[in-house]
Amino acid sequence: MNNKPIEEFRSFNRFYTAVIGLLDNHILNSNYTLVEARIMYELYHGKNQTASDLIHTLSIDKGYLSRVLRQFEKRKFINRQRSAEDTRVIFLNLTAEGKKEFQQLDKASNDQVKSILKELSEKDLALLLGSMAEIKRILTSK
Amino acid sequence: MNNKPIEEFRSFNRFYTAVIGLLDNHILNSNYTLVEARIMYELYHGKNQTASDLIHTLSIDKGYLSRVLRQFEKRKFINRQRSAEDTRVIFLNLTAEGKKEFQQLDKASNDQVKSILKELSEKDLALLLGSMAEIKRILTSK
DNA sequence: TTATTTTAGTTGACTTAGTCAACTAAAATA
DNA sequence: TATTTTAGTTGACTAAGTCAACTAAAATAA
């Protein structure tokens, strides 16, 4: 393989790193860190997740996660329920309060994204989403 | 606008955050931090850049940058030359040593990307790069 | 021309993010 | 039953990043 594809791929990565950075920065101006937001996202979208699940889906250190979760518990965003079958594992779920917090955060992120997408022509929007789906498919397949 | 495009956009962002994270992790196992690698990249690809330039292209704090640059100088990766027209600004350039270091790092990144791309069919590779170009075009245009 | 504001870069003090290894307790496997 | 593995916690630490104050020079306003 010559170097062109590699260069293009990496160029896109640099570009998209900046895009993501921009969006993330927004979250960072909320009361949550990126990691917190992602944890809330995961807990919101799947119930009875465990710390192990989160470690794998988010690729974060278990010690780090443990502390974030303790914070969440203190803030009453989650409750923990020890599994009956395997008492080592603890099921995590957002409380009503936690859900509300997540929804607010999520809405803010949606608004921000919307403000970008609404500038695009219908055609470009379709192309954009199509391209994204394509990339996801290709890079997932393996 | 309904919520579907927004959801898809955000879903892609989550997905691609993981992709980038994977690639970045690789760099982190080298002797350089992400920020260092990006600074080297910028210096390698453009000459006589200033700290201000880097601050803007990389969106990093100037204090932070200042320290990284000092490190680079100590490691003899860059030299600094004060501008004659405006003595506040300092032109930054990689030394031969710095270039060599960057090239090594760059080669490692290339190899890593190559190992991903070589798994793809020719068709998928073309689709992938086309999609990336499309996204870049659409999100840059504004 | 002088006074004021802005810009480039540095430094110190600090907070947040993330890592690593040791540890407890339970479960799975040999 | 002994050993190994797994889930999660904790302590101690390093790295990453932020913020404001500062110096010196340049640009702009009065």
Image (spheres, coloured by chain):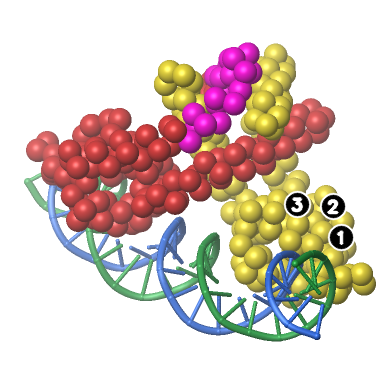
Chain colours: A yellow, B red, C green, D blue
**Picture residue at 59% right of the left edge, 26% below the top:** B119
On the image, which quarter does residue A7 sit in? top left
Mark 2 or 3, nearer chain start: 3
* B105 within the magenta span: no
**Pointer 3 indicates a residue of which chain?**
A
| Left or right of A113, for residue A95 | right
Q: Nearer the viewer, residue B31 or D4?
A: D4
On the image, which quarter does residue B19 sit in? top right
Mark 1 and mark 3 residues within 8 Å of each other at the beta carbon: no
On the image, which quarter does residue B139 sit in? top right
Indicate the amino acid at tag 3. Answer: Tyr
Q: How many marks?
A: 3
Residue range highlighted in magenta: B112-135
Labels 1 and 3 in the same subunit = yes
Examine the residues drawn in magenta and state their main secondary structure: helix
Q: CA distance from mark 2 to mark 3?
A: 9 Å
Mark 2 and mark 1 residues within 8 Å of each other at the beta carbon: yes
Residue that numbered label 3 is attached to: A41
Mark 2, Cα crowd under 10 Å, few <14 / some 14-19 / many 20+, is: few
Residue that numbered label 1 is attached to: A48
| Left or right of A138, for residue B78 | left
Q: Nearer the viewer, residue A95 or B100?
A: B100
Q: Nearer the viewer, mark 2 or mark 3?
A: 2
Q: Nearer the viewer, residue B125 or C18?
A: B125
Mark 1 or 3, nearer chain start: 3
**Pointer 2 indicates a residue of which chain?**
A
| Left or right of A107, for residue C7 | left
* Rendered image: mark on residue A46: 2
Estimate the x, y position of residue A14 in percent, counting from the top left. 47, 34
Circle 3 sits in a helix, a strand or a loop, which is it?
A: helix
